[in-house]
Image: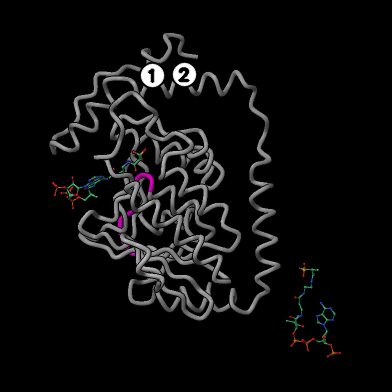
Amino acid sequence: MTSNERFQLVDVKIEDRICFITMNNPEKLNCLSDAMCRDMVEALHYGYSEQCVAIVIRANCRKGVWSAGHDIHELPQDGSDPLAYDVPMERMLHRVQEVAIPVIACVDGSVWGGACDLCLSCDMIVASENATFAITPAKIGIPYNASGIMHFVNQLGLNKAREMFFLATPIEARDALNVGLINRVTTADKLESELESHFLAPLRRNSVMSVSAIKRQFRILSKASSVIPSEGFERINAYRTRVYKGADYIEGINAFLEKRAPNFKGKASDLDTNPF
Ligand code: YZS
Ligand code: YZS
């Protein structure tokens, strides 16, 4: 079976020890649907098992969209956690972080929501200057999740992470470069050559065994964050549950699908009347 026959929504090809995974569902703006996320996980396994030295994730864009993020049609409305640890999108994000060879996001369009977390889950990002990045749970009434928030805080710092989550508006590639969200920005016509010369050529030259051992250490050490008392996690869970079981969450999904502005009625005090 050729590599591509096993995948529906991604194209996978291996060239000179690099596994190129191209999200190829432009009709759906490369939404991170369950099916797309399962294909991505399978493709990561394939790239590693074929002894590649790195994996590149790119997209076949339509309407200038690299990926529109989680498929909003698939957000559960039965009161279950939309971003639980084991939902397909979250599992895919973990696998990108865990696969023991470097993963590089090559971005030439707008990146939304969970797709922004996908880019941050990669080890490095090269983007064209027209790329934008937005994390948008606040736009849809979603509480996001602790591991995802820590991802942004660790990578961008508190100030920029808060700006991105609270405003839910896109940041430009140059701004993303300045805050360390991405590694390199180029003109659109130089994106592929920059990917090859700055990232892939050294990775082919270096010892993949050494690089893999270093990535595995990054992974273990990045989890060595300060210990949060269990009461902290219980409070996080209480807040998140109130949001995704609340009216704003359903209103946010319906408003998006009905193409109208949401009319959120939730109040901060619904979470806790104590402001501190
Ligand atoms: O009207 P039709 O049927 O043609 O469908 C429209 C959109 O409904 C659909 N579509 C989506 N369907 C499901 N999930 C999505 N994420 C999604 N995005 C778009 O695609 C068709 C074309 O969309 P239009 O809006 O008409 O196209 P355009 O005006 O060019 O705008 C493209 C963007 C991507 C800017 C716009 O569609 C948009 O803002 N989409 C939502 C992007 C977003 O906020 N994604 C985050 C989803 N949430 C997550 O990833 C996390 C759970 S969280 O929210 O926590 O970050
Ligand atoms: O041929 P002769 O006998 O004149 O010696 C050459 C080099 O072999 C020698 N030399 C070194 N010898 C021992 N250890 C080194 N780190 C080292 N670096 C250089 O110095 C003479 C002149 O070197 P050339 O290569 O001929 O000079 P040039 O062409 O100007 O290049 C200079 C650099 C520094 C660019 C080149 O020598 C080079 O890339 N050196 C290796 C730099 C490097 O990768 N160092 C990291 C070593 N490892 C560690 O610190 C850690 C264990 S780790 O690897 O984990 O980071």
Residue beneath disc 1: 242
Q: Quadrant of ligand 2?
A: bottom right
Tell me if residue 30 comes above or below residue 207 in the rendering. above
Q: Secondary structure at mark 1?
A: helix
Find residue 274 and report its horizontal and vertical position in percent. 46, 9
- Whether pointer 1 and pointer 2 mark residues with C-beta atoms closer than 8 Å, the reply is yes
Mark 2: few, some, or many residues within 10 Å (few <14, many ≥20)?
few
Calculate the distance from the C-alpha at mark 1 to the C-alpha at mark 2. 6 Å
Q: Is residue 254 visible?
A: yes
Type of amino acid under label 2: Ala
Q: On the rendered image, what quadrant is the N terminus found in? A: bottom left
Q: Residue furthest front?
A: 1
Near-viewer residue (153 or 145): 145
Residue at x-position 30% and y-position 25%: 78
Residue at x-position 37% and y-position 27%: 80
- The magenta stretch is 108-114
